[in-house]
Image: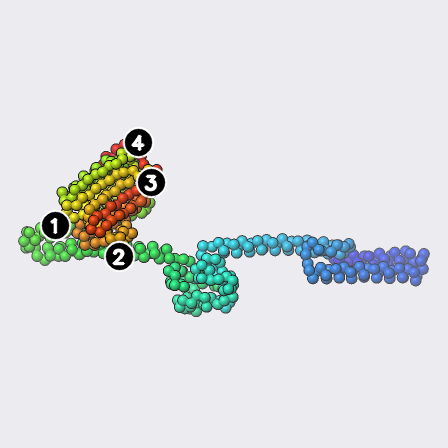
């Protein structure tokens, strides 16, 4: 494509020489023709040299200029270099985006080369595996993650499932680590923090074990009595009645447990409850009546209402939460003790408290009281019909009302359980519509 211009130029020189020959004579014409050919050669050599120099340090801004065939060549070269620059910029922007995405990933990513040496790692993997990007690049992963479980996983070559790593560098983080081969020789090492997930699974397992245990005891009792009734049909009436009574008590216990479990599950499902205008004064009086009913005259029950303010919240839930506190006060206060129900407003917040002069609780138990099935005195809780779920229910209800459960107690002197409601839940007395239940 390019050679024809040079051939055409040579032919042009030859034609011009033929035209001029009659005027200049053979020797002068030949000399002029030769001079033209030498010039053409010099022109090409110079441009070849410029091209060579440019190729040693190519940049779109420094492509040489010329004319003739070289103008076309340089022009194409310029366009090619510019297009290449553009696609290179695009490529490096895409690479930057990938690296930024890798850096931002909530899971750890380490790229390992053919020999399992670290090529690249993101900040999350550094945090998970305790890697140092400056020091550890190029290091063999097995030198840095020394847990036997990981070493074994690395050598098995079966990476279809992740491996769980515990006690990494003495910490209590639990990691799920998986190797993913790619690119036929390299591997991706993915790390995920599953500490929270494992904790939830443990809580779930414990919960199932607790529920089974709580149900097994009354079921065993009922089963045993039924067996006796079947085997000894001629039992005397008094024994028979006492056994039937005990069975009745045990089924009541199971029923209370199931009811509390259903309440907890409903509260945990987070379904929004209806908002009522609750007359706290009326509710406190109602609860005092319930406390007297439960106490059957064994305690003195007092109500202290220091404010007529009402409360915005779900009546049934609030009744259940306050009722649980009242029932606990009755159950954990020996005969002759006092139970005081209080409703007051402090710094704009509504506080409902139940104070008793009962057994009291040692300080180390207080933070754990709202855990499901946590009991300070297992025997007393069971003998008084406790399910171990009451305060867990109270805590959930308080949370649903953005309220806080506060406990103060002194062993042998008594306890005070309070629920503190935020100011935005308070209602003026005139805003109240009594919700009778
Ligand atoms: P339970 O059904 O066992 O009463 P709760 O969740 O209501 O379950 O209470 C958890 C534990 O907190 C109880 O087992 C008891 O040991 C303790 N507790 C709760 N209320 C009181 C109280 N007023 N006085 C003393 N101990 C209490």
Q: Gap between marks 2 and 4, in whole Å?
A: 47 Å
Secondary structure of the residue carrying numbered label 1: helix
In the rendered view, tell whether residue 189 sits above or below residue 356.
Answer: below
Residue behind mark 4: 431
Residue 209 tag number: 2
Task: Assess whether mark 3 and mark 1 are in contact (beta carbons under 8 angstroms).
Answer: no
* Ligand 1 contact, mark 3 (Cβ < 8 Å): no
In the rendered view, tell whether residue 141 sits above or below residue 281.
Answer: below
Of 157 and 435, the residue lying toward us: 435
**Residue displayed at 26% across by 41% down:** 352
Colouring convention used in this rendered image of the protein: rainbow
Query: Can you give x and y, in whole percent of width and height, for residue 426 in the image?
Result: 32, 36
Question: Pointer 4: residues within 10 angstroms few (<14), some, or many (20+)?
Answer: some
**Residue displayed at 69% across by 62% down:** 56
Residue behind mark 3: 422
**Residue displayed at 27% across by 51% down:** 366
Of 82 and 253, the residue lying toward us: 253
Query: Of discs 4 and 3, which sits in the foreground?
Result: 3
**Residue displayed at 25% across by 45% down:** 417
**Quadrant in which the C terminus is drawn:** top left
Task: Assess whether mark 1 and mark 2 are in contact (beta carbons under 8 angstroms).
Answer: no
Secondary structure of the residue carrying numbered label 3: loop
**Lower position in the chain sequence, tag 2 or tag 1:** 2
Question: Pointer 1: residues within 10 angstroms few (<14), some, or many (20+)?
Answer: few
Residue behind mark 1: 245
């Amino acid at each position: 494509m390019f050679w024809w211009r040079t051939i055409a130029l040579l032919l042009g020189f030859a034609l011009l020489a033929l035209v001029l020959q009659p005027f200049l004579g053979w020797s002068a014409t030949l000399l002029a023709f030769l001079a033209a050919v030498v010039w053409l050669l010099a022109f090409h050599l110079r441009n070849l040299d410029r091209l060579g120099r440019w190729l040693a340090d190519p940049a779109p801004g420094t492509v040489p200029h010329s004319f003739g065939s070289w103008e076309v060549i340089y022009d194409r070269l310029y366009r090619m270099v510019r297009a290449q620059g553009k696609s290179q910029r695009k490529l490096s922007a895409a690479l930057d985006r990938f690296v930024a995405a890798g850096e931002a990933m909530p899971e750890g990513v380490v790229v390992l080369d053919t020999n399992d040496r670290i090529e690249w790692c993101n900040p999350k993997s550094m945090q998970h595996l305790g890697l140092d990007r400056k020091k550890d690049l190029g290091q063999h992963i097995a030198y840095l993650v020394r847990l036997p479980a990981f070493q074994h996983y690395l050598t098995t070559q079966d990476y279809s499932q992740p491996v769980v790593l515990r006690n990494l560098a003495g910490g209590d983080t639990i990691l799920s680590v998986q190797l993913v081969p790619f690119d036929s020789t390299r591997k991706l090492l993915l790390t995920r923090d599953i500490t929270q997930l494992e904790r939830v699974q443990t809580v779930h397992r414990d919960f199932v074990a607790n529920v089974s245990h709580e149900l097994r005891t009354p079921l065993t009792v009922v089963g045993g009595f039924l067996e006796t009734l079947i085997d000894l049909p001629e039992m005397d009436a008094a024994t028979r009645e006492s056994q039937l009574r005990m069975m009745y008590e045990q089924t009541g216990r199971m029923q209370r447990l199931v009811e509390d479990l259903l309440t907890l599950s409903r509260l945990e499902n987070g379904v929004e409850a209806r908002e009522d205008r609750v007359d706290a004064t009326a509710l406190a009086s109602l609860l005092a009546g319930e406390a007297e009913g439960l106490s059957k005259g064994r305690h003195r029950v007092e109500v202290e209402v220091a404010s007529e303010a009402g409360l915005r919240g779900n009546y049934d839930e609030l009744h259940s939460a306050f009722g649980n506190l009242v029932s606990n006060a009755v159950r954990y206060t020996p005969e002759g003790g006092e139970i005081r129900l209080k409703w007051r407003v402090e710094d704009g917040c509504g506080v409902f408290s139940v104070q008793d002069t009962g057994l009291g609780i040692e300080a180390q138990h207080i933070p754990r009281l709202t855990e499901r099935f946590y009991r300070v005195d297992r025997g007393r809780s069971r003998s008084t019909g406790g399910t171990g779920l009451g305060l867990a229910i109270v805590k959930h209800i308080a949370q649903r009302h953005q309220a806080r459960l506060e406990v103060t107690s002194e062993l042998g002197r008594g306890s005070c359980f309070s629920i503190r409601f935020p100011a935005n839940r308070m209602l003026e007395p005139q805003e109240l519509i009594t919700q009778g239940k």
